[in-house]
Each structure stands twice: as structure tokens, then as C-alpha cells.
Image (cartoon, helix red, strand yellow):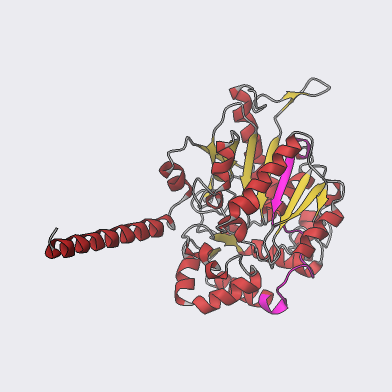
Amino acid sequence: MSGLGWIVAIKVMLIVCAICKNTTSSQAESRYKWTTLDWLEAQNVSHELHNVTTADGYQLQVQRLPRLGAKPVLLVHGLLGSSLGWVCLGPERSLAFQLYHREYDVWLANLRGVSPYGRGHIDLTDVMAEFWRFSFHEHGAYDLPAIIDHMAEVTGGEGGGEGGGGGGGQGASGEQIPDQVLLIGHSQAFNAFLVLCTVHPRFNQRIQLMQALAPLARLHRQVRFDAFQVRHLMKFVKKRQKGNKFEIFPPGYFRITCQSKRDLCEYYTKQLVGSAQSNKKLLEAFNYENLLQGGSDREIKHLQQIWKSGDFISYDFGPVENMQIYHGVEALTYNISQITVPIVLYFGETDAIATPEGVHGIYARMLKSVRSVRRINSPKFNHLDFLISGDVKSLVNDKLIEQMEQFLEGRLPYVIE
């Protein structure tokens, strides 16, 4: 080839490389805007959409990656989350895909307030203040019971299989007992689980195992942020309320804000979430359009009340309303010591919300139920790393699946880390 020919060939190669790089970058950028359904359809994975209506009228969409006759697993998101958190790292690293490929019947919960899967109601719309009057109490008292009962109804009608999925069994008195569900939840999902099992004790028999990633319960003196950060957050919430903006963080809010105010985002993320496994990717979660969004003012206020009270209490409406609702002037304390579901707790070393001290505090109050407390094996691991860390498969998902399968085989070791 002549010298001119080599020059032309090199130019062509450089152009092709530039096009490929731009295409790859564009594809990665577009994935930040994907919803759960976009991910499921892109992977061409078999999936079903289930519409669930709660006893108080909220209409929720639950996604399922079906394995008929297999053991059902329900994944439940936390505050500001959705089912997207279980699929947004793709088939190699996301927990929903890992469980599906290991032959589990995977269900993805979307609780009230989630965009776009938890915005329906038989009477209300999401532009009404009344729609947003909920906290994790309603997630546990209404959303989870409706979803788990729906799962039992669907899998019971499909018949049993080798994995023990459908059909259930019979109690001593001959009544039909629905199949037990394996539950996995992140962050505030644990609060909803505690409410579920205290308000509806029957679910203590319906949930076979709860694995809680970065769980919350009592927050007083067990978080790494202080009263200044809490006051600042509550001022922001009140400002949204005054503007009749009932949804605290609309989809895309964090992405837009953190692009224009990066330093401020980094500060508050470190303060309220904790130092990330890789601080270069501290704001990675905020690149996603739909990963962190929603939230009602009552959700934030309920967590603030728990932080102030030092106990795991129901929502405090004030003396007058408390008397009408609870028949007493004070909010009720949930009796979590009566929960009998086996529980495994996981914590990250630098999580500012679900701190090591806080998670061990949960263990101390639930000695009858907690079977294991596991530290994520990384010197830095914060609240959001459980969803978007590049090493989430090896550090979290693989360990979680191993623990679950050891439990199902009756050989889960009792380890408190």
C-alpha cells in the first residue's frame, strides 16, 4: 500500500473509532432515562405486568419475571426508589436478573407514589394533596399486603412445581395456607416490612425470610448527620409544601439539580448518604432520570419524627388527631419484638443513614428474629451503593443469594459482623 493509501486508511479508522465511541456514549446516556420496562424489554426477558389495587384505593403496577412453580421472591424498594433499582445495572449485575437466571420467580414491587408505576388511584389523581398523604406506614399496612396476597392468588392458580412455588399447603385445621415469600428490601422497605408484620400478624407466617439491605428503624443517635442537616431538609420540604408541590422530588429533579450545582450535591450526598465505594461515582445515582424520585412530605416528616423520638413510632398527627386515630394523645410505638420472620441484615461501613451502629441496634431489639448481621466487605460502602456500585454483584448480590440458599437448605450460619 502506498504512503497515501496508509494515510487514508488511518483516517478512516479514526473516524470509525470516533463514531463507535460516540454511539457507545449515546447508548449509555440513553440508558439513564430508561424505566424498568425499558430494561426488561431490552433484555428480551419474559415478564408480566400485574395491576394491584390496595384496600384504600391505590393502584400499583408490579412487574414479574415468571418461573412457574419456582420459589417466589419479592424485591421491595426504599424511600424515593422503585423497581428500577433492581434492574438498572443490566443482566450481569442487577439482582432481579441474577435471581431470575437462578430459577427464582421474581416479583418487583412498586409502592404508592412511585413514577410511573404507583401513580394510580380509583378516586384521586397525583396532583391532589390527598394522594400524597402517606408514609412507610401505608406502604406496610396497605401496599405490601395487597401485593403479597396478589402473588399468592396468581401462583396458587398456576399449580405447584419442583421449586415449591405454587399451591401452598394445608394447616392443621385443613385451611389452605398460601406459599411463603422470600422478601428482599432496601432501606425504608424494612420499615414497611416491620409495619406489615405488626399491623397484620398473619404475614409472620407468609414471609419465609426477610433480607434487609441498609435497613432503618430507630434513627436517634444512630445516623451520621446532625440536626443542622435535618433542619435544612425540613425547610426544603416545607418550601415545597407552600408551593403546593406535593411530590418532593419529581423524576429528573436530582439529575437537573446536580448538573448545575454539583458541589452542593456532593456535600449533601456525603452528609446524608455517606462516602461512596468510589467517590468518583458519588453522584452516579443522580444521573438516572427515574432511579430516585417521588416521596411525600409525610414520608420525610415520619422519618424526622422517628429521629427525634428515639423510637420506632407511627406517624404523629398531633394530640387532637392522634386521639381520633390512635385513641390516645401520643403516636403508637410499633411492637417489633413480636415479629417472628427470620431476618438477615446487611450494612455498609460508611452508610450515613443505616449506620453499623443503627443496624446493630435493630439486631439488639430483634434478637428472636435476626439470624445474621453482615457487613459489606468494602472499607467504603454507602446507602446507594447497594443499588449502583460497580461491584454490587460480588459484594452484595452473590452473598445475598448464597445466604438465602443456605437458609432454604437449613444451614445458614449464625454470624454477627
Instruction: State whether residue 369 is above or below residue 187.
Output: above
Closer to the camera in the image, 195 or 337: 337
Closer to the camera in the image, 145 or 408: 408
**Residue 157 part of the magenta-drawn span:** no
Callout count:
0
Is 14 placed left or right of 159 in the picture? left
Instruction: State whether residue 174 is above or below residue 361.
Output: above
Closer to the camera in the image, 77 or 123: 77
The magenta region covers 204-229
Locate the C terminus by quadrant.
bottom right
Image coords of residue 392 (percent x, y): 59, 54
Is 173 placed left or right of 168 in the picture? right
Q: Is residue 192 shown to the viewer in this render?
A: no
Image coords of residue 14 (percent x, y): 25, 63
Image coords of residue 98 (percent x, y): 57, 42
Is 178 placed left or right of 264 in the picture? right
Task: Name the residue at 59% across, 49% down.
Answer: 111
**Residue 218 part of the magenta-drawn span:** yes
Closer to the camera in the image, 135 or 106: 106
